[in-house]
Image: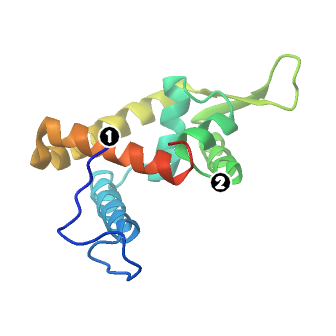
Amino acid sequence: MVDFISYGKDMNNDELDLSTSLSFQLLRAAHGVQLHHQRALEGAPLTLSQFWVLKLVCDGTAFRPSDAARRLGVHPGDVTRLIRGLSAKGLLTRSRRGDDQRALHLAPTPKGELVAAGMAAAIAKADAALAAAAGPEGTERLIGMLDALRERAVGRA
């Protein structure tokens, strides 16, 4: 089991205290990181959501929209809209292959690979700046804790 920080208060009571509410603190942290990345990506051709879908396709971990939705933990309809936008910008292709003509297969275009690589470098630099405060061990521990929370929340733990 992962050791979680309790802020010195009983986390099992029924009273909602924003200073100890995991959902509130995670929302604030996620919003802060998102703003940090948006500043780092100022002028970029894609939104963060579009970038993450394109990155998954470029990395070969999302060959279908459902793969991207599952990896991102979002509704497939949301990914479908993002894919349409990426396709319209000429950053990825959508095709039907093989026996299952219902399945949509995704592939990056050369332009998509360039855009994804440039944005990935900017995000990596932004992440490094945030991670520097926690150090390598702290960052690894934080990611482990967040993974454990996500798994518990979706019923896989």
Quadrant in the rendering for residue 42 = bottom left
Q: According to the image, what is the colour scheme of the structure?
A: rainbow
Q: Residue 97 location in percent, x, y?
A: 81, 20
- Specify whether residue 26 is in view: yes
Residue at the (16%, 42%) spot, across then down: 138
Residue sitting at the far top: 98
Are the residues flagged by discs 2 and 1 in contact, CB closer than 8 Å? Answer: no
Q: Amino acid at mark 1?
A: Gly
Q: Residues within 10 Å of mark 1 (few under 14, many from 20)?
A: few
Pointer 2 or 1: first along the chain: 2
Q: Nearer the viewer, mark 2 or mark 1?
A: 1
Instruction: Give the position of the N terminus as an image quadrant.
Output: top left
In the depicted view, which residue is nearer to us: 31 or 92?
Answer: 31
Q: Amino acid at mark 2?
A: Asp
- Specify whether residue 46 is in view: no
Q: Residue 28 location in percent, x, y?
A: 33, 68
Residue at the (37%, 76%) spot, across then down: 13
Residue at the (15%, 36%) spot, across then down: 137
Q: Residue 68 location in percent, x, y?
A: 60, 38
- Residue matched to label 2: 78
- Residue matched to label 1: 144
Residue at the (88%, 27%) spot, across then down: 101
